[in-house]
Image (cartoon, rainbow, N blue to C red):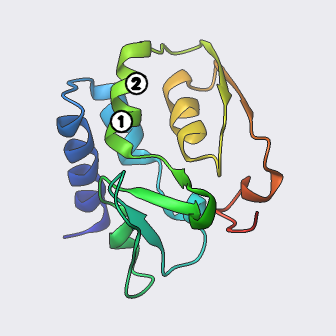
Amino acid sequence: MDGSGKYRSYAKLICTAAKLDDPRIEEAFRSVKREPFAGPGPWWLNLGAQSYVQTPDDDPAFLYQDLLLALDRERGINIGQPSAHAYWLGACNIKSAETVVQVGAGSGYCTAILAHLVGADGRVYAHEIRRAIVGAGSREP
């Protein structure tokens, strides 16, 4: 499967798990890649209230599952579960050209999805108190 098929399947899986039929949100999850926000692999993944499991290597395919992705495993700081974010984004009904404020931006993955949803005419203001996790998935405290 080429890359576009992988991202299309991931986006469809996320929206289906969120019980969401919103082509804009599906397009956002298809367009915004997780790799730039994950830091270097291997990664620690989690299904919620479970133990983390480390991926055997840095194959980006591991990032395209409906799982939490640890930014700081010891503190439980994650890139959130994609279907949960899709569900909440659907409830917010974000429109093009709107202004959005995000508190707890982490490494910026959901921020990038928000930016995709508001488009070039919108604005996203994001705040993260832990400077070390802002950016490309740093795992520092």
Residue drawn at x 18%, y 70% as measured from the top left: 1
Tell me the tag on residue 84: 1
Residue that carries the numbered disc 2 in the rendered image: 88
The CA distance from mark 2 to mark 1 is 6 Å
Residue drawn at x 52%, y 62% as measured from the top left: 70
Q: Amino acid at mark 1?
A: Ala
Residue drawn at x 59%, y 13% as measured from the top left: 97
Q: Amino acid at mark 2?
A: Trp
Query: Which of 55/58 is in front?
Result: 55
Q: Position of residue 73 (x, y in %)?
A: 56, 65
Q: Is residue 60 above or below residue 128?
A: below
Q: Is residue 47 above or below residue 41?
A: above
Query: Which of 112/80 is in front?
Result: 80
Q: Are marks 2 and 1 in contact (CB under 8 Å)?
A: yes
The part of the image, by quadrant, that contains residue 87 is top left
In the image, 78: left or right of 84? right
